[in-house]
């Protein structure tokens, strides 16, 4: 590994980002500048273009636009309201009930849609005004919504886990999906505990429990939406269809459901499809350029050198995992999830496998790290969406977010150093 190439890659990338150049373009240009030092300019252009095209040539990636479309249909199809009503029937009577409702609804909607942004916008837009009416501070409501929206990226189906599978060289998507359940639910429960303590301390209004009949009715209303999880994950685990085929089934199912709920009309489909295409194009450009950068780093032997340096620093697996977690948390502050997973998986995966960590376990740990980054400035997309929906400044949300960050970090440490939490469910299903 030449030090010159590493400096060019890192410095050019940071300069481009600081100038406001889009992340995907910054990744592509910095990769090209680095490659131009090692090989002739024309060869650098063609090689990088080929690597970007090759990186996108994957059947598994077809699942991403389908799941994005499914999430868009859910966001427009009245599913969020039914999930909120169901969550309120279950936990609305607890101290800080509406905060619990917000968290549980985000977990359910995020898991069904596979999108933290969709959960933050759909649930936040619905729950924010309701929490404010009941006396909850707007900043607290926004913080609850922002932090809990990320749980849907850990609880399957999750686009980012599909991206990790691609970056890792073929870790089973089904195994990753199954492995995400316990850590994702644990993250949600930790956020609920924090919300309860704060609500009791601030004496927020406590909701009332609903009757058994009303609870059953709201469960029945939400049941078709919840059934999607059973169909998608159950079908993948049972081997009836692949993750990619499951994503197409999810689109068909949510389209039918949206029409049954009468929340989506034929006239709405062009807008929904256009929004899906816009989101997909951004994600795919990020994937293409990130795969190009991953290849450049491999060409320069950067992953091998990082592995050598980390293992030289210490031979204690716990210390190595702690260092990697700290680095990923730092990366998550400045980089979006998709490029971060594609760029840093090839760097850190050889290190963790050498110390005996399962690639499935590492995938969940990596995603949990980057989920925290989605809630932090300056690049936290969910932070911006949550603040925008709540119509509040980022500065006012940071303070109430701090205890949420602490809870998420503690769960991350538990999941990192207690692998059984993540791995026992995939092992039960034979992965």
Image (spheres, grey):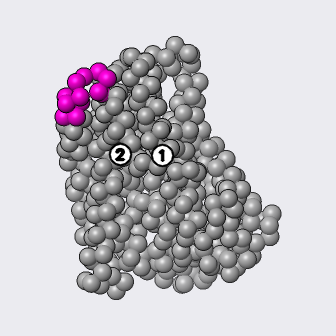
User: Image height check: is 4 above or below 126?
Assistant: above
Q: Quadrant of residue 75?
A: bottom left
Q: How many residues crowd around disc 1 within 10 Å: few (fewer than 14), some, or many (20 or more)?
A: few
Residue 45 part of the magenta segment: yes
Quadrant where the image shows the N terminus: top left
Residue 116 part of the magenta segment: no
Q: Which residues are magenta?
A: 35-47
Front-most of 405 and 230? 405
On the image, the x and y values in percent for residue 45 come to: 22, 34
The residue that disc 1 covers is: 19
Q: Residue at x 20, y 42 (%)?
A: 53
The tag on residue 25 is 2
Front-most of 284 and 155? 284
First along the sequence among labels 2 and 1: 1
**Element under label 1?**
loop
Q: Is residue 63 left or right of residue 214?
A: left
Q: Magenta stretch: dominant SS?
A: helix
On the image, the x and y values in percent for residue 91 come to: 61, 70
Q: Residue at x 56, y 38 (%)?
A: 330
Q: Nearer the viewer, mark 2 or mark 1?
A: 1
Q: Are discs 2 and 1 less than 8 Å apart at CB?
A: no
**Element under label 2?**
helix
On the image, the x and y values in percent for residue 306 come to: 45, 21
Q: Quadrant of residue 251?
A: bottom left
Q: Residue at x 43, y 37 (%)?
A: 13
Q: Residue at x 34, y 86 (%)?
A: 262
């Amino acid at each position: 590994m030449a030090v010159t190439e590493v400096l060019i890659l890192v410095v050019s990338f940071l300069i481009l980002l600081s100038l406001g150049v889009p992340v995907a373009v910054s990744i592509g240009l910095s990769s090209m500048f680095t490659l131009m030092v090692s090989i002739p300019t024309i060869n650098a252009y063609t090689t990088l273009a080929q690597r970007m095209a090759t990186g996108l040539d994957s059947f598994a990636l077809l699942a991403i636009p389908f799941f994005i479309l499914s999430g868009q249909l859910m966001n427009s199809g009245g599913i969020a309201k039914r999930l909120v009503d169901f969550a309120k029937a279950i936990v609305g009577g607890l101290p800080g009930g509406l905060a619990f409702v917000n968290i549980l609804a985000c977990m359910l909607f995020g898991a069904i849609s596979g999108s933290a942004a969709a959960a933050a916008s759909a649930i936040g837009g619905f729950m924010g005004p309701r929490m404010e009416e009941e006396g909850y501070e707007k900043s607290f409501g926004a913080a609850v919504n922002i932090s809990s929206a990320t749980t849907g990226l850990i609880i399957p189906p999750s686009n980012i886990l599909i991206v990790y599978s691609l970056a890792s060289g073929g870790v089973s998507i089904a195994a990753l999906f199954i492995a995400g359940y316990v850590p994702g639910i644990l993250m949600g429960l930790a956020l609920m505990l924090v919300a309860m303590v704060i609500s009791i301390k601030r004496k927020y209004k406590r909701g009332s429990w609903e009757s058994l009949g009303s609870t059953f009715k709201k469960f029945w209303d939400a049941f078709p939406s919840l059934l999607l999880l059973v169909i998608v994950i159950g079908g993948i685990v049972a081997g009836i269809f692949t993750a990619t085929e499951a994503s197409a089934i999810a689109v068909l199912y949510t389209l039918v459901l949206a029409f049954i709920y009468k929340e989506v009309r034929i006239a709405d489909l062009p807008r929904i499809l256009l929004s899906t295409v816009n989101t997909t194009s951004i994600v795919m450009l990020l994937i293409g350029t990130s795969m190009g950068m991953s290849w450049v780093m491999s060409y320069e032997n950067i992953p091998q050198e990082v592995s050598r340096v980390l293992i030289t620093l210490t031979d204690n697996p716990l210390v190595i995992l702690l260092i990697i977690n700290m680095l990923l948390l730092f990366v998550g502050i400045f980089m979006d999830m998709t490029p971060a997973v594609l760029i840093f998986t090839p760097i850190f995966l050889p290190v963790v496998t050498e110390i005996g960590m399962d690639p499935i376990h590492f995938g969940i740990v990596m995603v949990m790290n980057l989920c925290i980054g989605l809630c932090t400035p300056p690049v936290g997309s969910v932070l911006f969406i949550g603040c925008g929906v709540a119509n509040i400044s980022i500065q006012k949300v940071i303070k109430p977010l701090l205890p949420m960050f602490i809870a998420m970090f503690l769960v991350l440490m538990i999941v990192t150093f207690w692998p059984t939490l993540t791995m026992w469910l995939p092992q039960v299903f034979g992965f």
